[in-house]
Image (cartoon, rainbow, N blue to C red):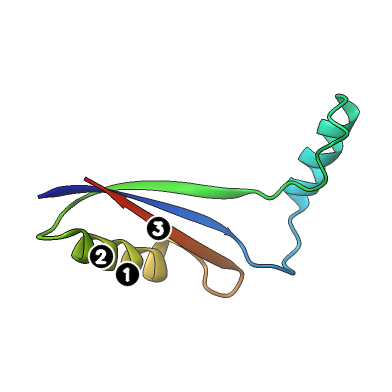
Amino acid sequence: MKFLAKIIVSLKEGVLDPQGVTIGRALTDLGFDSVARVGTGKIFSLEIDAESDVRAREIASDAAAKLLANPVIERFDIEVAR
């Protein structure tokens, strides 16, 4: 079966996000005063052939841990759909 895994990579709490700060300032300058904080990240979409959604999640998690996210400064979340 084919599954679509979405891997969302973001910075861990406490890691400086200068791009997020810059975007936050620009949003304030544009009048979006209610935006208190901006965090940046990456989204990866993987089409995975696997026998179950559990196995697809394992494959996506392994890919994220080994290549797609830097475990020192980033964390990741995975969503799997059929």
Going from the N terminus, do you reach mark 3 or mark 1 first? 1
Q: Residue 39's mark? A: none
Q: Residues within 10 Å of mark 3 (few under 14, many from 20)?
A: some
Residue 75 vertical placement versus 49 (above, below): below
Q: Amino acid at mark 1?
A: Asp
- Front residue of this view, candidates 4 and 46: 4
Residue contact between numbered discs 3 and 2, judged by CB atoms under 8 Å: no
Q: Amino acid at mark 2?
A: Ile
**Viewport quadrant of the C terminus:** top left
Residue contact between numbered discs 3 and 1, judged by CB atoms under 8 Å: no
Query: In what element is the residue under mark 2?
Result: helix
Q: Which residue in the protein does label 1 denote?
A: 62
Q: Is residue 8 left or right of residue 25?
A: left
- Front residue of this view, candidates 36 and 62: 36
Q: Position of residue 73 (x, y in %)?
A: 61, 69
Measure how far apart labels 3 and 1 are at the Cα level.
11 Å
Q: Is residue 47 left or right of residue 68?
A: left
Q: Residue at x 52, y 68 (%)?
A: 70
Q: Quadrant of residue 14?
A: bottom right
Q: Which residue in the protein does label 3 denote?
A: 78
Q: Is residue 39 left or right of residue 25?
A: left
Going from the N terminus, do you reach mark 3 or mark 2 first? 2
Q: Is residue 27 left or right of residue 40?
A: right
Q: Residue at x 58, y 75 (%)?
A: 72
- Front residue of this view, candidates 59 and 57: 57
Q: Residue at x 32, y 69 (%)?
A: 62
Q: Position of residue 80 (x, y in %)?
A: 30, 52
Name the outermost residue toward the top: 30
Query: In what element is the residue under mark 3?
Result: strand
